Image (cartoon, rainbow, N blue to C red):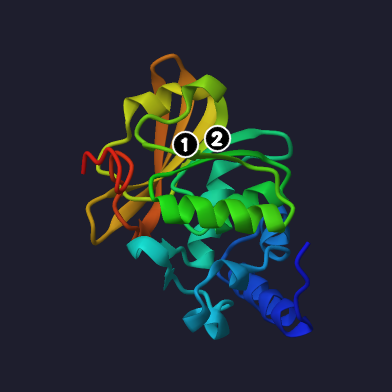
Amino acid sequence: MIEESFEAKGKRKRLIEELRSKGINDERVLGAMGKVPRHLFMDDAFLRHAYQDKAFPIAAGQTISQPYTVAVQTVLLGVGKRDKVLEVGTGSGYQAAVLAEMGVKVYTIERQRELYRKAQIMLGDLGYRIHFFLGDGYEGQPQYGPYDGIIITAATAEVPDKLLKQLRIGGRLVVPRGERDSQVMTLYERRGEDDYEITTHGYFVFVPMLRGIANGNDRD
């Protein structure tokens, strides 16, 4: 495990109190976020700001989500220990770490090779056991499904049917739906073979979900 300073722990504690003041009241989620060292997932230029409730740029033109956004998606996902979750868009690996800290079995897909490799190293160094895939998030990972939850960390106008079908009946899929400038956080709860209850949970901003593997078999 990686050692960290008392200063970082103190800043993280203050961040958790800020999230609580903004209405996040799931103590399992807050507890996990209170243990994951967010500063380790960020570029050196932004380290001093790691525990501000803001999104920041990372490699490959992507971002590490605002902690409040991570909390909202994780709460909506509604999963617990030993549940199986597919994450579409590994990014920095921070969201995957939060889920793993909750005892979730995480399967995560990334289309950017640089991010895929960095996340593998970082999450491994932190002691998290996560299943990583370099691939197209639109395809999911059907061979490991069905999943108790699917979390999409990029914006899409329409949820791929292939992903919805990889959700178990009773499972939940969380996705920011919409165009580039603003999306609505949307929860799909699978009630039957072709029956989904859909609810919306506020406006957010995400990078777009793209097809293919970057610098590989791109289909953007």
- Please, what is the three-letter code of the amino acid marked with disc 1? Leu
Residue at the (39%, 35%) spot, across then down: 198
Q: Look at the image and tell me whether residue 146 can be seen.
A: no
Q: Residues within 10 Å of mark 1 (few under 14, many from 20)?
A: many
Seen as rendered, the residue at the extreme front is: 216
Q: Look at the image and tell me whether residue 14 can be seen.
A: yes
- Residue 149 numbered mark, or none: 2
* Labels 2 and 1: the sequence-earlier one: 2
Q: Is residue 88 above or below residue 64?
A: above
Quadrant into which the C terminus falls: top left
Displayed quadrant of residue 11: bottom right
Residue at the (57%, 58%) spot, across then down: 94
Displayed quadrant of residue 71: bottom right
Q: Are marks 2 and 1 in contact (CB under 8 Å)?
A: yes
Q: Which residue is mark 1?
A: 173
Displayed quadrant of residue 183: bottom left
Residue at the (25%, 43%) spot, across then down: 157
Seen as rendered, the residue at the extreme top is: 193
Q: Is residue 77 left or right of residue 1?
A: left
**Measured Cα–Cα span from mark 2 to mark 1:** 6 Å
User: Which of these two is toward me, 22 or 217?
Assistant: 217
Q: Residues within 10 Å of mark 2 (few under 14, many from 20)?
A: many
